[in-house]
């Protein structure tokens, strides 16, 4: 199933995406559900065209966004970094989340903001989980979505740590929905800026796969339903400028489109 969180004329809802995703969002509808996407729910009978609603980041509540750096060897090499022996982790605040078609804002503090196309893991269940083996980690994964780990590259280099560079408002586009039934061992990860391909890779080239990452992270921190893990980006990161439109596509899930503008303080 594909679960989405969305706004419509009567309020906010959670629903299931219906239709052929490959045919584009104009061909899709969203069927409203009542209850929890992570547990028991029922269909209310209400439906909207996806083109007529606003899509939000799909988890209803995200306590944290755990990100993995240098998880593709070619991306590590393009920034003159070594591949880590263990997953290299950092956090993005939940306030950095935006949804499909929301605007990425370039902050005045940075002169270079890059896109980073990534597969995102969404944790499910009804309670927190920790200290998981591979089998437990696989069960904890509710589904997958598309992310853009927007990064102020110059601040990342100058600060010596990544909180500011990764944490600005609007720096974590996520969506458009969660796909719960998907083999992610070999999915195309593509990023286009104004229809020009900038990144093109595959999840098969991850240094640490999704299940290994969930297990590793769970041995440090409790993972809660709705938490998101960004699994790293392939090579090809490049700057965004005001007026760009950036599209991240992951095979089997869909596309995440966001316009870009300069923020004026």
Image (cartoon, rainbow, N blue to C red):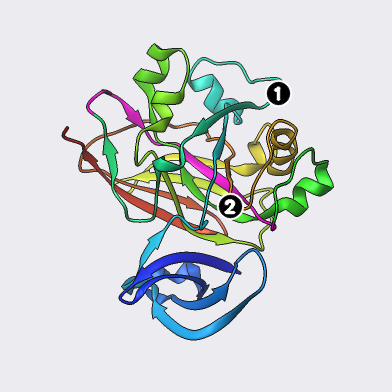
Q: Nearer the viewer, mark 1 or mark 2?
A: 2
Which residue occupies the extreme bottom position in the image? 45
Residue 236 position within the rendered picture, expressed as x and y whole percent measured from the top left = 45, 32
**Percent of width and height locating residue 219:** 75, 33
Q: CA distance from mark 1 to mark 2?
A: 24 Å
Element class at badge 1 = loop
User: Residue 226 has which mark?
Assistant: 2
Look at the image and say whether residue 115 sits in the magenta stretch: yes
Q: Is residue 243 left or right of residue 255?
A: left
Q: Is residue 208 above or below residue 246?
A: above
Q: Residue at x 52, y 42 (%)?
A: 118
Q: Secondary structure at mark 2?
A: loop
Task: Please give the label number shown on residue 57.
Answer: none
Q: Quadrant of the C terminus?
A: top left
**Relative to 215, residue 108 above or below:** above
Q: Residues within 10 Å of mark 1 (few under 14, many from 20)?
A: few
Q: Which residue is mark 1?
A: 86
Q: Nearer the viewer, residue 239 or 179?
A: 179
In the figure, residue 124 lies in which quadrant? bottom right
In the visual, does 38 lie left or right of 5?
A: right
Q: Which residues are magenta?
A: 108-126
* Rendering quarter of residue 204: top right
- Seen at 68% across and 31% down, the residue is 207
Residue 160 placed where, x, y %? 46, 12
Label total for image: 2
Residue sitting at the far left: 264
Q: Is residue 43 magenta?
A: no
Q: Is residue 62 left or right of residue 207?
A: left
Q: Is residue 237 above or below residue 94?
A: above
- Percent x, y for residue 260? 26, 43
N-terminal-most mark, 1 or 2: 1
Quadrant where the image shows the N terminus: bottom right
């Amino acid at each position: 199933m594909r679960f989405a969180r969305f706004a419509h004329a009567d309020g906010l809802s959670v629903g299931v995406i219906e239709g052929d995703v490959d045919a584009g969002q104009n061909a899709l509808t969203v069927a409203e559900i009542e209850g929890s996407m992570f547990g028991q729910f029922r269909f209310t009978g209400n439906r909207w065209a996806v083109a007529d609603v606003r899509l939000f980041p799909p988890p209803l509540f995200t306590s944290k966004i755990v990100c993995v750096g240098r998880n593709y060897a070619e991306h590590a090499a393009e920034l003159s970094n070594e591949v880590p022996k263990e997953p290299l982790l950092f956090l993005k605040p939940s306030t950095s989340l935006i949804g499909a078609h929301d605007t990425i804002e370039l902050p005045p503090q940075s002169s270079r903001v890059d896109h980073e196309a990534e597969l995102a893991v969404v944790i499910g269940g009804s309670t927190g989980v920790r200290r998981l083996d591979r089998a437990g980690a696989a069960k904890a994964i509710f589904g997958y979505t598309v992310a853009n780990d927007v990064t102020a590259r110059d601040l990342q280099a100058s600060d010596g740590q990544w909180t500011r560079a990764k944490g600005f408002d609007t720096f974590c586009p996520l969506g458009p929905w969660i796909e719960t039934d998907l083999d992610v061992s070999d999915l195309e990860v593509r990023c286009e800026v104004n229809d020009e391909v900038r990144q093109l890779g595959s999840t098969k080239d991850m240094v640490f796969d999704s299940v290994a990452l969930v297990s590793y992270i769970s041995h440090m921190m409790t993972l809660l339903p709705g938490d998101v893990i960004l699994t790293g980006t392939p090579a090809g990161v490049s700057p965004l400028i005001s007026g760009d439109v950036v599209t991240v596509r992951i095979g089997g899930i869909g596309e995440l489109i966001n316009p870009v503008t300069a923020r004026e303080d």
